[in-house]
Image (cartoon, rainbow, N blue to C red):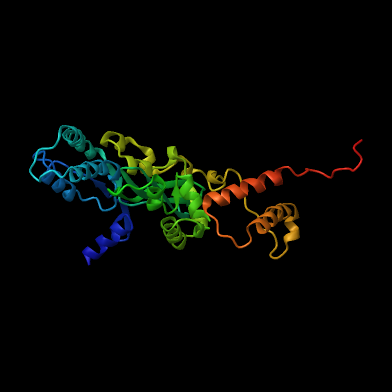
Amino acid sequence: MLLRKWREAIRNNLICSGSKKVSKVYIYIYFDPKDLLSRREESKRFILSVVGRIFDPIGILGPFIIKLKCVLQDLWTLGEDWEFELPPRLRQKWQQWGSEFEGLTEIKIPRFYLDDIDQEISKFETHCFSDASKSAYGTILYLRFVTCNKETETSFICSKSRVAPMKSLTLPRFELIAALFSTDCLISYYWIRGDSSTFKPYVKNRAQEIQSLSDPIQWGHCPGKDNPAELLSRGISAVKLVQNELWWLGPPWLKLTPDHWPNHKGIHKKSIVERAPWWGGFYERLVKAIEDPLRKTLGKALLTFEELSTILSGVEVIVNHRPLTYVENDPG
């Protein structure tokens, strides 16, 4: 009975004495690295054992751990023996990483996502960011909640990162591997947004996979300076990770009030009445001005991306040269 009450107390973030609430319980996640690097060796076997002993299932240390995984991949590429000492370049990276590891003891994050919020929550949202580089790719997830008093807070949920495959791929392909919701790669964003059947098989398959997993309203572009997943794909030192608010709280604009979503740049969608195109006669006429030349020029032809871009550029020139107002026959 006492054990059950204790479990309920932790679930409610309160210690209960009978029916009286006494004080809050704050459960924190922290890291104790003293046993992990109790001995310092400089071999591929020892580095692999260190990577395997780091227990970080929700990816709190992702930007720091990915640096060591990249070192391990370099060792695999060189084909070094398990017990062979590290080459000077990789030994320097390993020593630098090991010297920073103890700084992770300063990280303490609340296990309860809402931290010390006492107000009733009126809205919950999840926001996902992704990024890729030549070294690694990853994604990170945040919880955004709005209280009844219109106060907005964010909380780190989890992250996931992977070392880039040894097989050389283009950066947009890496971005597509990482992309799910918000990405800082405009090329990948446009591939996901809309008709993927016109692209090569890899882009087509990956874009269709992303399209099937989420609603289009969730796909977005996040500039690199505001994208916390950049830290996953490029790595960061332990000291900078501890102090980095972008990693722990997400982009600053996530905490803006609900009346401000900056990605839309002040643009608000307003639908017209269904099957009543005359309500939007002005822009519907412009759509027709583009569709007609495309239909007459292309017919049922299947074009490459470059060919379609060339045709659209020609149509764009024609449409932009049209008169803006009615032109009188009388030149005077």
Residue 210's quadrant in the figure? bottom left
Q: Residue 53 in the image: x percent, y percent?
A: 16, 49
Q: Residue 14 in the image: x percent, y percent?
A: 31, 55
Q: Residue 258 in the image: x percent, y percent?
A: 54, 48
| Foreground residue among 186 and 155 | 186
Residue 118 appears in view: no
Outermost bottom residue? 1
Looking at the image, which residue is at 29% across and 45% down?
Answer: 62
Q: Is residue 7 left or right of residue 175?
A: left
Seen in the picture, residue 54 relative to 86 is either above or below; the reply is below
Residue 72's quadrant in the figure? top left
Q: Is residue 145 left or right of residue 66?
A: right
- Marks counted in the figure total 0
Residue 275's quadrant in the figure? bottom right
Looking at the image, which residue is at 88% across and 43% down?
Answer: 328
Seen in the picture, residue 251 relative to 118 is either above or below; the reply is above
Can you say which quadrant of the picture contains the N terminus?
bottom left
Q: Is residue 313 left or right of residue 203?
A: right
Can you say which quadrant of the picture contains the C terminus?
top right
Q: Residue 211 in the image: x percent, y percent?
A: 47, 60
Residue 152 appears in view: yes
Q: Is residue 181 left or right of residue 21?
A: right
